[in-house]
Amino acid sequence: MPYINVKITKEGATAAQKEAIIQGMTQVLVDVLGKNPATTVVVIDEVEMENWGIGGMPVSEFRKTIK
C-alpha cells in the first residue's frame, strides 16, 4: 500500500485543489510504478508559514527574493 505525504504551506488551499492534488499524486504512482489506486493513500499536511523555511529564511522572506 503506497503512502504519499504532501506538505504545503497553509494558505487556504481549497477542497477542490486538495482533491486535485490527491488525484494527481495517485495517478503518478499508477503511471510510474503501476500501483493500484484503490490502495494508494495520500495525506496532505498544511504547515503554518512561520514553521517553514527555505535557504535559512522563513518562506515568506524567501519568496521576496525570487519575485
Image: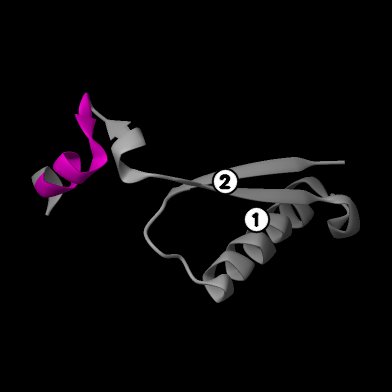
Provide residue 25's location: percent of width, then percent of height.
65, 55
* Magenta portion: prevailing SS class: helix
* Residue 59 drawn in magenta: yes
Q: Nearer the viewer, mark 2 or mark 1?
A: 2
Provide residue 16's location: percent of width, then percent of height.
57, 75
Q: Helix, strand, or loop for circle 1?
A: helix
Which amino acid type is marked by label 2?
Answer: Val
Is the Cβ of the residue at disc 2 closer than 8 Å to that at disc 1? yes
Tell me the residue at 20%/45% (across/down).
60
Compare marks 2 and 1 and give the one earlier in the sequence.
2
Q: Quadrant of the C terminus?
A: bottom left
Asked whether residue 32 appears in the rendered view, the answer is yes
Q: Which residues are magenta?
A: 56-64
Tell me the residue at 89%/58% (across/down).
38
Q: Nearer the viewer, residue 8 or 65?
A: 8
Horizontal side of 25 relative to 11 (left or right) equals: right
For mark 2, does the 10 Å Cα neighbourhood hold few (<14), some (14 to 19), or many (20 or more) residues?
few
Where, by quadrant of the figure, is residue 19 drawn? bottom right
Provide residue 18's location: percent of width, then percent of height.
57, 65
Where, by quadrant of the figure, is residue 23 drawn? bottom right
3D distance between C-alphas at marks 2 and 1: 9 Å
Tell me the residue at 25%/40% (across/down).
59
Q: Nearer the viewer, residue 64 or 12?
A: 12
Q: Which mark is residue 25?
A: 1
> Residue under circle 2?
6
Asked whether residue 52 appears in the rendered view, the answer is no
| Figure label count | 2
* 57 versus 10 height, above or below: above
Q: Quadrant of the N terminus?
A: top right
Where, by quadrant of the figure, is residue 62 drawn? top left
